[in-house]
Image (cartoon, helix red, strand yellow):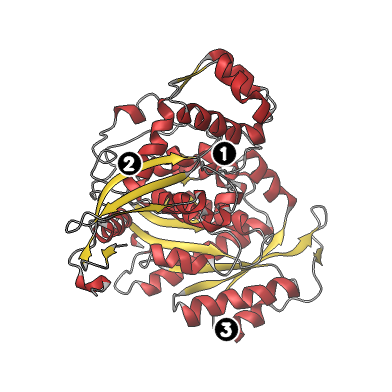
């Protein structure tokens, strides 16, 4: 996908990305000639479609951790999929996810960032009260709530904040 | 006003290079696999996965190096049927080592990643609403990763257990243009043959990929006491169906509840029951598959070197 400034007849350059905000991404392009700016706003479905492509716009072709997409995209998975010899996700080279990646890279980075949020034991226990089939979506909802407010940790207080929303 | 092609480069997306790299990685991995065989049915409930496990184990019991990829993401059964559920995976130099079943049968399945028996495959997303727009892409991505990121090593045979549906083979061929051929499974019911006929035409006429042959599963029930054979379905035109489409008829496998028992406990039916009609039928079909592939690879005279 390319963006063209109609007035200048010049291809626009990506200058900024924001989000995801409730699954929506904001991608800002500007014209190098007249500095006109436009923003492309994606809905949740469009964001996820880009994420599903398993490419990073502007990214390199270096191979990531084996089966990275499967292990990062499954909402519910075994804790002990890999034996102790397995390198953890955090140990891997992050150069790909921090590439220039104008859009899909930004999407991937944003979703990977969600794993940085720490859950306290009490919060995990509360989440455990939710039926298994709904737990993953509830987890995403709580993490989204936390991200939007800049929280790095989900504890009892955060769970209280979203209690009404999820009925925990 | 400039058009897309007037603007030099790909707008910085670098997508073409990444997709090419993905394809090259997959091809390099598959270069060490001698025969890639997709097993399909078109119609669900015909015992396709059971045929996959039994054919794979028949060849593994003959000391061939065999792997199974469970491409049925939403109905994955290979890990349970081969007894590898719960195995922890390990990484090797270039990827993830497959789970190892009896007789060194290598298995990769999404089921190895799921926490318990009742957990379905749900992909992480901001919303599951309208997930139909991207779920298929996630499944294809997972299958591509299983193929290219699994350290299959040198294999004589890699069986791919496809989910039901005539659309699954073209998707797989897009990923694996080097696929050797397909085995199509049906039961003698008219309805199954009706759908399977479409799969054969899809494979032969549209995709022009070799059909190794047609397997007639659950052809009859045999009394375990007296050996009397009773048909499970009225009529059996499967052999005629094969003739009509000019594909080899690989044989019929009689229904035997012990096949299901072995699948449930993750053991090899052929190893546990060496002299039953179903065992002999499966071994004959495995032999015919081997013969077909032997003929296909001109210059190969030793079945061991298939």
The picture quadrant where one finds residue B234 is: bottom right
On the same chain, marks 1 and 3? The answer is yes
Picture coordinates of residue B60, whole percent (x, y) = 47, 50
Question: Which one is nearer the viewer's eye here, A160 or B144?
Answer: A160
Secondary element at tag 3: loop
- Category of crowding for the residue at label 1, using alpha-carbon neighbours closer than 10 angstroms: few (below 14), some (14–19), many (at least 20): many
The reply to whether residue B54 is in sight is: no
Position of B153 relative to A139 (above/below): below
Residue in the foreground of this view, choosing between B275 and A97: A97
Judging by the rendered image, the residue that carries numbered circle 2 is B95
- The answer to whether residue B276 is above or below residue A97 is below
- Determine whether B166 is above or below B30 in the image: below
To the question of a shared chain for discs 2 and 1, the answer is: yes
Q: Chain of mark 2?
A: B
- Residues B250 and B184: in front is B184
**Which numbered disc covers residue B83?**
1
In this figure, which residue is indicated by the disc labeled 3? B245
Q: Alpha-carbon distance for marks 1 and 3?
A: 37 Å
Tell me whether the residue at label 1 lies in contact with that at label 3, contact meaning CB atoms closer than 8 angstroms. Answer: no
Q: Please state the horizontal and vertical placement of residue B93, each as a whole percent of the image.
A: 27, 38
Q: Is residue B283 left or right of residue B173?
A: right
């Amino acid at each position: 996908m390319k963006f063209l400034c109609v007035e200048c007849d010049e291809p626009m350059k990506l200058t900024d990305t924001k989000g995801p905000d409730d699954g929506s991404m904001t991608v800002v392009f500007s014209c190098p000639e007249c500095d006109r700016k436009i923003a492309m706003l994606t809905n949740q479905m469009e964001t996820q479609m880009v994420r599903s492509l398993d490419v990073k716009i502007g990214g390199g072709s270096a191979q990531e951790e084996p089966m990275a997409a499967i292990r990062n995209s499954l909402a519910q998975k075994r804790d002990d999929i890999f034996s102790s010899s397995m390198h953890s996700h955090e140990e891997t080279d992050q150069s790909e996810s921090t590439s220039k990646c104008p859009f899909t890279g930004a999407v991937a980075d944003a979703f990977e960032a969600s794993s940085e949020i720490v859950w306290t034991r009490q919060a995990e226990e509360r989440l455990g009260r939710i039926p298994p089939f709904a737990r993953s979506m509830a987890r995403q909802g709580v993490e989204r709530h936390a991200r939007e407010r800049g929280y790095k940790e989900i504890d009892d207080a955060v769970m209280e904040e979203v209690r009404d929303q999820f009925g925990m | 006003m400039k058009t897309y092609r007037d603007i030099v480069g790909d707008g910085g997306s670098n997508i073409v290079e990444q997709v090419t790299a993905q394809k090259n990685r997959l091809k390099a991995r598959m270069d060490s696999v001698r025969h890639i065989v997709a097993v399909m049915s078109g119609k669900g409930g015909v015992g396709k996965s059971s045929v996959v496990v039994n054919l794979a184990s028949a060849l593994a019991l003959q000391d061939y190096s065999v792997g199974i990829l469970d491409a049925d993401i939403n109905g994955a059964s290979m890990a349970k049927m081969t007894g590898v559920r719960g195995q922890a995976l390990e990484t090797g130099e270039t990827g993830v080592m497959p789970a190892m079943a009896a007789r060194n049968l290598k298995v990769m399945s999404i089921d190895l990643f799921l926490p318990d028996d009742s957990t379905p495959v749900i992909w992480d997303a901001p919303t599951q609403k309208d997930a139909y727009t991207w779920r298929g892409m996630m499944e294809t991505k997972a299958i591509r990763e299983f193929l290219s990121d699994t350290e299959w090593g040198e294999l004589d045979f890699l069986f791919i257990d496809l989910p039901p549906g005539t659309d699954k083979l073209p998707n797989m061929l897009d990923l694996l243009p080097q696929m050797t051929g397909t085995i199509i499974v049906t039961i003698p019911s008219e309805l199954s043959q009706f759908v399977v006929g479409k799969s054969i035409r899809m494979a032969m006429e549209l995709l022009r990929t070799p059909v190794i042959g047609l397997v007639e599963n659950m052809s009859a029930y045999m009394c375990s006491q007296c050996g009397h054979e009773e048909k499970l379905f009225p009529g059996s035109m499967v052999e005629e169906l094969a003739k009509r489409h000019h594909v080899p008829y690989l044989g019929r496998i009689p229904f035997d509840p012990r096949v299901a028992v072995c699948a449930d406990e993750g053991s090899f039916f052929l190893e546990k029951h060496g002299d039953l009609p179903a065992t002999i039928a499966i071994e004959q079909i495995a032999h015919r598959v081997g013969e077909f592939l032997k003929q296909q690879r001109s210059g190969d005279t030793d079945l061991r070197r298939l």
